[in-house]
Amino acid sequence: MIAFPAEARCPSHPDRAAAATCSRCGLFVCEACLSSRDPALCSACQERRSAEASLLGLTAYSFAGALGAGFRLLISRLWFFAVVCALFSVPEAIMDATLEEAQVGFRTSYWASSLYGSTIGLIGVIACLATMAAGVQGRSLRLREALAEGLHAWGRVFVARLWAGIKISLWSLLLIVPGIVKWVQLSLVTPAAYLEPTADSHSRSEYLTDGVRWSLLGLLLLSTGMAIAASTIPSLLLGMAAELAPVLNLPGTCCSDWIVNVALLYPEAVALAAYYALRAQKDADQASVG
Ligand SMILES: [Zn+2]
Ligand SMILES: [Zn+2]
């Protein structure tokens, strides 16, 4: 617990000492104005936070609700996401094409593409998440603002995801099932790390996923499967075209990387929708208990 100087006062109750600072707006809050303790939120921010899930059309978590809300989030600014993904797909395609030319083999190209996706590509994913989150709050981001947001939040989201990946691998070494359980428990690390910068994203994800793990497992598998299925056919066609006309190799790789990246935003959007719904649900549970 952080000790506050005696002169730190609640802006709504100047006669009362501050008990915390709101993790969202940064204002001091007294004991009476503190709506939530972990993370600390003032009553105005708590209200804003509760409104977000209902703006998405979700009041509580449901499998179909999250799947549909994720789809609406993706479609809401699809052209914008297409532009962001195009920016990040060009260097990726050049890298893929160079590696293919050098005949490095599947393993190396797989690792290179994973490395690109989890480092540079992640900036694009966060830029898209920031745009979706802004949309939920009724704001709209420009391309430059979204990319700046992607860069700004990159460090903490990258560390949270890397650490989640290490934990999942370690649990998987033990046995497959604990690995899968860890994967589901940590499936909301990205939205938690992005939207709650001061909270521990791993414990937030574990807390939010508690009680709905089977449903979330199905949700993750289905949304990822749908994304892969939707991008496989155009990628195969582009690959065939490049085989017939080698001049199409680089543009074809560009296009198929782009389609895959746009499609893979779907599971991210579904996780974001699930995050909003579960957070609203757990906040409401906590409010009725407290
Ligand atoms: Zn606040
Ligand atoms: Zn107060």
Image: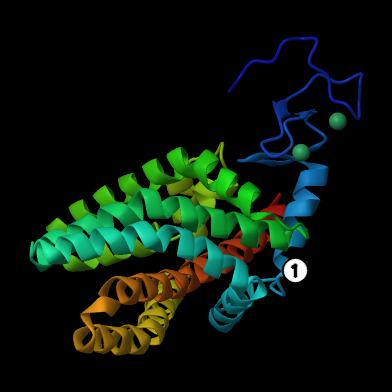
Task: Pick whichever, 93 or 74, lies toward us.
Answer: 93
Q: Residue at x 46, y 39 (%)?
A: 156
The vertical placement of 218 against 151, above or below, is below
- View quadrant of ligand 1: top right
Counting other residues with Cα less than 10 Å from the Cα at mark 1, is it few (<14), some (14-19), or many (20 or more)? Answer: some
Tell me the residue that label 1 is attached to. 54
Q: Residue at x 73, y 25 (%)?
A: 19
Question: Which percent across, then down, holds residue 142?
Answer: 68, 54
In-image side of 203 versus 18 (left or right): left
The foreground one among 274 and 281 is 274
Q: Residue at x 47, y 46 (%)?
A: 201
Residue located 72% across and 75% down the image: 57
Q: What kind of residue is marked 1?
A: Ser
Is 183 left or right of 16, judged from the image as shown? left
User: In this rendering, does residue 168 appear at all?
Assistant: no
Residue lying at the far top in this picture: please name it: 6
Question: Percent x, y for residue 6?
Answer: 77, 9
Q: Quadrant of residue 263?
A: bottom left
> Could you say where residue 54 lies in the image, as x and y percent from the top left?
75, 68
- Element type at marker 1? helix
